[in-house]
Image (spheres, rainbow, N blue to C red):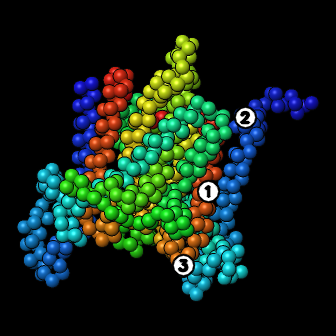
């Protein structure tokens, strides 16, 4: 009895509010969303715990024996029970390499999107809140940047850096470069969406109230308006991580990303592609399937979030 | 309209200017043109003299002005590797890339409009669900994996299709080597075009479906129903027209994007186009060729975007008012 009264008086806890929300309700009914989240969490765990799960360390040359190269997975003839997914062209255990590769791919995807989000949110808030000349300048800038596809910009920038630094130094910096390039190239996605929702929020009374109280613009932007634009941010973030992972894989496939000694899923596929004609399909196909299902569940989650939260996303 | 046009053209020129500036600073910092010219055996004093003579010691802006002047006259330097004018080398490869993009665009247009419209009209039918399911899988598969998959299935396992190169080409208009007119050339085009199309097709299906569904909810379509017009007329004349508006804008941007993705498909299929050439140039640090590629592709981007904006302005009268947005 007492408890009941308390919940009426006190504002419900964040957890309680989450359980009551439309989001959670829809999640309990959507099998696809549940499955996708489950798979995504599994990927997250695989990436996080890679050093513990992986039977071998693919970065340690002492554990690699070239004599083990191109062993087929355990269900094919001529396999070695020590490597259940087979080995790649350098004799690395494919399962361990995929675990570490997933880790690299996810890390790059998440960091790049975090960078995009930070740049995009700050610019979007500024443009939307200030309006006027700042707005038109920043948005024109975003237009121009968007009109050059991310892939194009990334390929050109990375190619030029590779040619300047030389391959060896470049390979050491590859991860940072990938994060920077993918992160910087895609900020307009965030900026436009945030700006659109800021424009809608700005007209509301709570913003006027905050201004009348005398709060400074940054405080109103970040503490008051930003929390109300979270649902579009959430929706684009899922899709953007998926895109960033694809972009990373594509760049690595071109040889502009992670080196073969420290492969992401993309560079693993790239190194396997050379052997696909000689019949060693598993070096390409298995990491490829891992990559596709990772991106697929993220896109499915993004679609589900978009349907549930139904934010006004910037179109076009 | 005139003001809008001028604004767009000015913007295009500014962007081209920035591209040329970026390209030039790449050229300025990447590689040493002198070493490519004379090799290692020339003494330091002679080098300095040559540098002065070639104007390599001039201030940045003076050098840029010279570069821009030459570029406007179509001279982008000589490729270190091919020992030919860089622009010519690039333009020789242009038809191969454009045909790839053209083939992919055809596939996209022929498939995305009917599929998108159908799945908007009957969103709950089994076929629409299949289309949407396919499209989300399509978005999730990187273009190089599609390409590898197609090669593996149709070239290695089944042996139906060639896996690399352009095959037999015929010369048309004197300079354009085309693969569209021979059976062999067409066979070589099929797999690369499908893989290039695979990246955009799902996007367009989803876009057309979303726009169409929105348009079908609008008042004027309801009014058309109330007037008793035939469904076909409503769907394909009234609704489709407005559906295609945003598709034009997105389409224009995506053509540029496709040029970028040709680098990936060309690599997998060893397609002798600009993208493949560009990656080779990067590996050889062939700076003039890199710069020429940047300028040519930049120009393609700018021209398509400006054209799309202008076409959009023509078909959508509200843009005139919102010229500054």
To which residue does mark 3 refer? A89
What label does residue A294 carry, if any?
1
Viewer can see residue B29: no
Q: Is residue B303 above or below residue B240?
A: below
- Looking at this view, name the residue that lies furthest to the top: B227
**Do the residues bearing badges 2 and 1 touch, measured as CB atoms within 8 Å?**
no
x%, y% of residue A51? 65, 71
Label 2, label 3: how far apart the Cα atoms are: 50 Å
Chain on which label 1 sits: A
x%, y% of residue A307? 63, 36
Q: Residue at x 75, y 37 (%)?
A: A25
What label does residue B198 carry, if any?
none
x%, y% of residue B271? 37, 63
x%, y% of residue B255? 38, 45
Q: Nearer the viewer, mark 1 or mark 3?
A: 3
Sequence-first tag of 2 and 1? 2
- Looking at this view, name the residue that lies furthest to the front: B183
Quadrant in the picture for residue B122: top right
């Amino acid at each position: 009895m007492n408890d009941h009264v308390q919940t009426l008086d006190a504002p419900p806890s964040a957890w309680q509010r989450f359980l009551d929300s439309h989001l959670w309700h829809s999640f309990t009914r959507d099998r696809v969303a549940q499955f996708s989240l489950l798979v995504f969490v599994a990927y997250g765990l695989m990436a996080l715990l890679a050093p513990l799960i992986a039977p071998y360390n693919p970065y340690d040359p002492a554990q690699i024996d070239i004599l083990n190269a191109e062993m087929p997975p355990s269900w094919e003839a001529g396999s070695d029970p020590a490597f259940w997914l087979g080995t790649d062209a350098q004799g690395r255990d494919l399962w361990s390499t995929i675990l570490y590769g997933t880790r690299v791919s996810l890390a790059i995807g998440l960091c790049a999107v975090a960078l995009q989000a930070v740049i995009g949110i700050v610019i979007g808030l500024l443009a939307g809140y200030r309006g006027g000349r700042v707005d038109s300048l920043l948005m024109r800038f975003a237009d121009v940047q968007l009109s050059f596809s991310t892939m194009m910009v990334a390929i050109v920038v990375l190619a030029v850096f590779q040619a300047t630094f030389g391959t060896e130094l470049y390979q050491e910096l590859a991860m940072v470069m990938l994060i920077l390039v993918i992160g910087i190239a895609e900020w307009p996605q965030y900026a436009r969406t945030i700006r659109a929702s800021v424009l809608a929020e700005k007209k509301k009374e709570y913003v006027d109230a905050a201004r009348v109280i005398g709060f400074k613009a940054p405080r109103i932007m970040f503490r008051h308006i930003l929390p109300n634009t979270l649902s579009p941010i959430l929706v684009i973030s899922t899709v953007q991580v998926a895109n960033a992972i694809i972009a990373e894989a594509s760049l690595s496939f071109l040889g502009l990303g992670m080196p073969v000694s420290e492969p992401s899923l993309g560079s693993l596929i790239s190194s396997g592609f050379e052997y696909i004609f000689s019949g060693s399909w598993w070096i390409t196909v298995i990491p490829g399937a891992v990559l596709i299902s990772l991106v697929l569940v993220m896109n499915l989650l993004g679609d589900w979030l978009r349907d549930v939260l139904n934010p006004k996303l910037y179109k076009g | 309209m005139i003001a809008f046009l001028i604004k767009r053209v000015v913007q295009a020129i500014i962007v081209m200017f920035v591209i040329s500036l970026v390209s030039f600073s790449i050229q300025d910092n990447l590689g040493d043109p002198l070493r490519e010219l004379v090799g290692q055996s020339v003494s330091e004093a002679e080098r300095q003299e040559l540098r002065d003579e070639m104007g390599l010691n001039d201030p940045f802006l003076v050098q840029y002005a010279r570069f821009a002047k030459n570029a406007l006259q179509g001279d982008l330097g000589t490729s270190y590797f091919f020992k030919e004018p860089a622009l010519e080398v690039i333009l020789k490869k242009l038809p191969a890339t454009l045909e790839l993009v053209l083939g992919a665009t055809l596939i996209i247009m022929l498939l995305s409009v009917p599929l998108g419209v159908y799945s908007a009209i009957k969103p709950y039918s089994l076929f629409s669900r299949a289309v949407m399911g396919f499209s989300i899988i399509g978005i999730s598969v990187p273009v190089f994996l599609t390409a590898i998959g197609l090669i593996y299935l149709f070239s290695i396992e089944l042996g139906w299709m060639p896996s690399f190169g352009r095959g037999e080409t015929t010369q048309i208009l004197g300079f354009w080597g085309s693969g569209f007119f021979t059976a062999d050339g067409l066979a070589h085009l099929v797999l690369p075009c499908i893989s290039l199309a695979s990246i955009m097709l799902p996007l367009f299906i989803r876009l057309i479906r979303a726009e169409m569904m929105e348009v079908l909810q609008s008042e004027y379509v309801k009014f058309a129903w109330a007037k008793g017009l035939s469904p076909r007329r409503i769907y394909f004349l009234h609704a489709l027209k407005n559906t295609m508006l945003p598709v034009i804008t997105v389409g224009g941007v995506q053509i540029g994007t496709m040029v970028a993705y040709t680098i990936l498909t060309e690599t997998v299929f060893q397609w002798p186009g600009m993208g493949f050439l560009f990656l080779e140039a990067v590996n050889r640090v062939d700076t003039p060729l890199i710069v020429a590629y940047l300028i040519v592709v930049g120009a393609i981007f700018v021209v398509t975007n400006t054209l799309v904006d202008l076409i959009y302005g023509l078909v959508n009268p509200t843009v005139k008012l919102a010229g500054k947005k």
